[in-house]
Amino acid sequence: MGVVETRRARGHRLSAPGDGPPDSEGGALVEFEWSQEDSSFRTQLRAFLDEELPGRWTGAVATLGSRENVAYSRRFAGLMAEHGWLTPHWPTEHGGHAASAWQHTVLGEELWSIGEPRGPQYMNVNWIGPSIMAHGTPDQQRLHLPLIARGDVIWCQGFSEPDAGTDLTSLRTRAELDGDEYVVNGSKIWTSYADVANYCYLLVRTDSGGTRGQGISVLLVPTDTPGFAIRPIGSMVGEHSFNELVFTDMRVPVSCRLGPQDEGWAVVREALAYERVGAPRWARAARLLEEVVEWAIANDRFDDPVSLEIVGRARATCEAARLLYYRVIDERDRAQGSSANPSLARVAMVQAERIVAEACLELMGAGSLEYASLADHQLRKSLAAGVAAGTYEVQLNLISRLHLRLPKG
Ligand SMILES: Cc1cc2nc3c(=O)[nH]c(=O)nc-3n(C[C@H](O)[C@H](O)[C@H](O)COP(=O)(O)OP(=O)(O)OC[C@H]3O[C@@H](n4cnc5c(N)ncnc54)[C@H](O)[C@@H]3O)c2cc1C
């Protein structure tokens, strides 16, 4: 998208407090037209997906964490890497092509809209790899980045604990230094993909003094390390989506620590900022909505005013989420500092997921009760969307502070 070059010449106006840079009437200008380069990339990518995916992928109703889909995503990520499309936004020295944030956005939209066939690897390429680039030692970069860039590896994120979810800085998994190793004891919960992962991006407490944000460190741990136990947790989200991790005297070399000891919170906050808008969820919700509309038309269920109204509202909500998401990408493209826009975009994406679920229930009626129907799938996705990667309520808190400038409650 040619935002930078053309934003003043042909822009629409989006205005928000603190948005910059303003035009003469106080709003920021954003050009919504895609550049020719981005459009032709999208066309090429769609042709590849049409060729590669049919019959081998369950698409928009892909079940989070299902073994079948994770197995497929390993193969798919390898194919993407061969085309140079797995890490195009990475710098060339780490196997990327320094592609723009907009090209990365095209990639995210196209893949999320069909159910994210990269599976867990979207985390590697979006924020785990970049976090290792920013804070890793040369040895860590040499080991991990080529594996991620080739699509040869799956990572999981060991953040949440039974008493540390939203309030992540109260995490208690301890890592005590013993010579040139840490001895790790504690547990993690809700860890997606741990059962199929090769590595875990693990948050541990290395010091209990100071504020709670201090004394946290990041360890890059192979999941086959002795003392690393993985137990599945059943849930309504997907077939086998969650795991509990239990660490018992797990020894991890100091060389596996990412960034300085006790200062891991800064490393993680940077990674989380990326994670919060990393997934263009609106793209999948919008596509699924159109699939349900097609189904309703074919089944003569698209004629009452209630259905029409909710579909209209759902389409508008998806579109609002798309525009707010683009505003974040624009900020990123121009390397602008932090703002409330990622929280606004995430709230809008959750609202899009939820209203599309409502529309599915309305249109499909009793058919929604069928396991793995479009409506059943969307309902479960929409419930998870407001919790994963920072809850909906916490994003609202951030908006009230950073955007509306309200005092902290
Ligand atoms: C699909 C999915 C995948 C996940 N994958 C992973 C993963 O791979 N790795 C990992 O570490 N974790 C993962 N999680 C866990 C997720 O990060 C946590 O569930 C989330 O951070 C919330 O923490 P919690 O469950 O402890 O809820 P709590 O933090 O206990 O929150 C409970 C409720 O209280 C509200 N609340 C809490 N604090 C405030 C506040 N200050 N103001 C207003 N409301 C508040 C919350 O919004 C929520 O509604 C995943 C979760 C989901 C749903």
Image: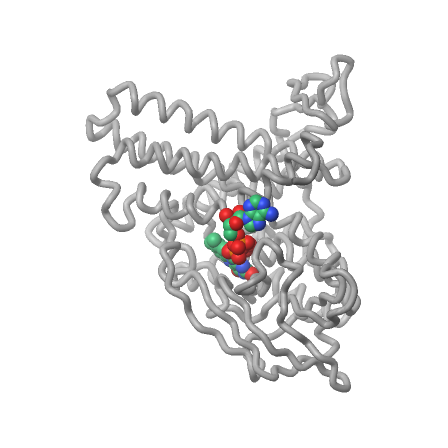
Classify the position of the N terminus by image quarter: top right
x and y percentages locating residue 59 in the rendered image: 38, 47
x and y percentages locating residue 134 in the rendered image: 76, 58
Residue nearest the viewer, comparing 358 with 48:
358
Q: Residue 214 appears in which quarter of the rendering?
A: bottom right
Confirm whether residue 289 shows in the render: yes
| Structure colour scheme | one colour
Please say if 386 is above or below 403.
below
x and y percentages locating residue 208 in the rendered image: 73, 70
**Left or right: 147, with 136 as reference point:** left
Find the residue positioned furthest to the bottom. Answer: 179
**Left or right: 59, with 83 as reference point:** left
Number of numbered callouts drawn: 0
x and y percentages locating residue 350 in the rendered image: 49, 39
Residue nearest the viewer, comparing 152 with 268:
268
**Left or right: 77, with 363 as reference point:** right
Residue plotted at (61% across, 33% down)? 326
Please say if 125 is above or below 394.
below
Residue nearest the viewer, comparing 57 with 164:
164
Q: Residue 42 appears in which quarter of the rendering?
A: top right
Please say if 208 is above or below 69.
below
**Left or right: 49, with 169 as reference point:** left
Confirm whether residue 93 shows in the render: no
Residue plotted at (52% across, 68% down)? 197
Find the residue positioned furthest to the front. Answer: 409
Residue nearest the viewer, comparing 108 with 380:
380
Residue plotted at (79% across, 64% down)? 210
Residue plotted at (76% across, 17% down)? 23
Classify the position of the C terminus by image quarter: top right
